[in-house]
Image (cartoon, helix red, strand yellow):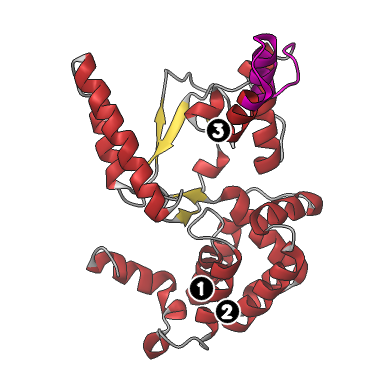
């Protein structure tokens, strides 16, 4: 389904003629259906590294009259070394990633092979394409609930009313998460050329959002930015940014394969190399808490 006739027409003109299964939409043996079913069995959708986002890239090149233009556009996204690519793929697919990646590559080739980007269908090229989307993919959150919660945050309420509203919202999120899983506010994924150029900072001067509740990404300044000053966003959420430098580095190293050297990290360079959880455990030991209480806190963190 499309949100409007205009969007449907735009999709048809750019990529959907290749991806439309037509009367074979419910045929489990259709190559695209086989590809999507294999992806679903490997990784819980949706997420920022979607196999169908890769399919849309190929379909766009297939339909384009100026194929070189699109190939140049896709080449602007950040690329990784072979070892880094393996780490990203392993992170996305798990311990059996090599066999799973080869299965996806074969199904992807069967469904979408295109001579103009034949390198994307080789084992090395497919791994590179997969890592490119995994590195640059942006989750697109269009949850009307999150918009409503954000509006609630701006209300001027009495302390007692604020407490009741916050408790209601917390319970609402728990009830919804029990039914939908953790992907409540991420309904898709996309590649945005300018946004992907923004580096990370633990003290960002800009943030990304989807305030119009659609696919349009907004990059908004959080403070005055001088001409020539780099625009940085945060790859961490608000809670993660408040954790220790070592905890932040651990998350960024595991998910994005770099060590942060933003002003906040440099200012905290002399802090102990322990995670926030380890710091909490040390405090508990100093207070003389029993071991089972410590275990309870660890389980809460998990």
- Label 2 residue SS: helix
- Could you tell whether 91 is left or right of 152 in the image? right
Tell me where residue 297 appears, x and y as whole percent.
59, 27
**Which of the numbered marks, if any, corresponds to residue 59?**
1
Along the polypeptide, which appears first: circle 2 or circle 3?
2
User: Closer to the camera: disc 1 or disc 3?
Assistant: 3
Q: CA distance from mark 1 to mark 2?
A: 7 Å
Q: CA distance from mark 1 to mark 3?
A: 45 Å
- Could you tell whether 219 is left or right of 82 in the image? left
**Which of the numbered marks, if any, corresponds to residue 300?**
3
- Could you tell whether 83 is left or right of 64 in the image? right
Crowdedness near tag 1: few (<14), some (14–19) or many (≥20) residues, C-alpha within 10 Å: many
Tell me where residue 10 appears, x and y as whole percent.
34, 67
- Label 3 residue SS: helix
Tell me where residue 67 appears, x and y as whole percent.
55, 70
- Residue 272 in magenta stretch: yes
């Amino acid at each position: 389904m499309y949100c409007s006739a205009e969007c449907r027409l735009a999709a048809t003109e750019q990529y959907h003629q290749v991806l439309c299964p037509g009367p074979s939409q419910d045929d489990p043996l259709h190559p695209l259906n086989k590809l999507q079913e294999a992806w679903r069995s490997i990784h819980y959708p949706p997420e920022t590294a979607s196999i169908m986002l890769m399919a849309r890239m190929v379909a766009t090149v297939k339909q384009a009259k100026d194929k070189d233009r699109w190939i140049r556009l896709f080449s602007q996204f950040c690329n990784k070394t072979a070892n880094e690519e393996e780490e990203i793929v392993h992170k996305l697919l798990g311990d059996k990633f090599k066999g799973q990646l080869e299965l996806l590559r074969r199904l992807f080739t069967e469904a979408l092979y295109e001579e103009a980007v034949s390198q994307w269908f080789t084992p090395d090229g497919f791994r590179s394409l997969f890592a490119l989307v995994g590195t640059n993919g942006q989750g697109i959150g269009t949850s009307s609930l999150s918009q409503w919660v954000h509006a609630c945050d701006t209300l001027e309420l009495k302390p007692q009313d604020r407490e009741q509203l916050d408790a209601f919202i917390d319970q609402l999120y728990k009830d919804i998460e029990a039914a939908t899983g953790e992907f409540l506010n991420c309904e898709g994924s996309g590649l945005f050329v300018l946004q992907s150029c923004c580096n990370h900072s633990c003290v960002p001067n800009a943030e990304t959002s989807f305030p119009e509740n659609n696919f349009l990404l907004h990059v908004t300044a959080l403070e005055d930015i001088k001409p020539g000053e780099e625009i940085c966003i945060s790859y961490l959420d608000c809670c993660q940014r408040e954790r220790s430098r070592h905890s932040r580095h651990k998350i960024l190293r595991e998910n994005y394969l770099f060590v942060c050297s933003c002003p906040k990290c440099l200012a905290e360079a002399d802090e102990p190399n322990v995670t926030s959880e380890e710091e909490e455990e040390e405090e508990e030991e100093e207070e003389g808490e029993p071991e089972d209480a410590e275990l309870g806190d660890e389980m809460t963190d998990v």
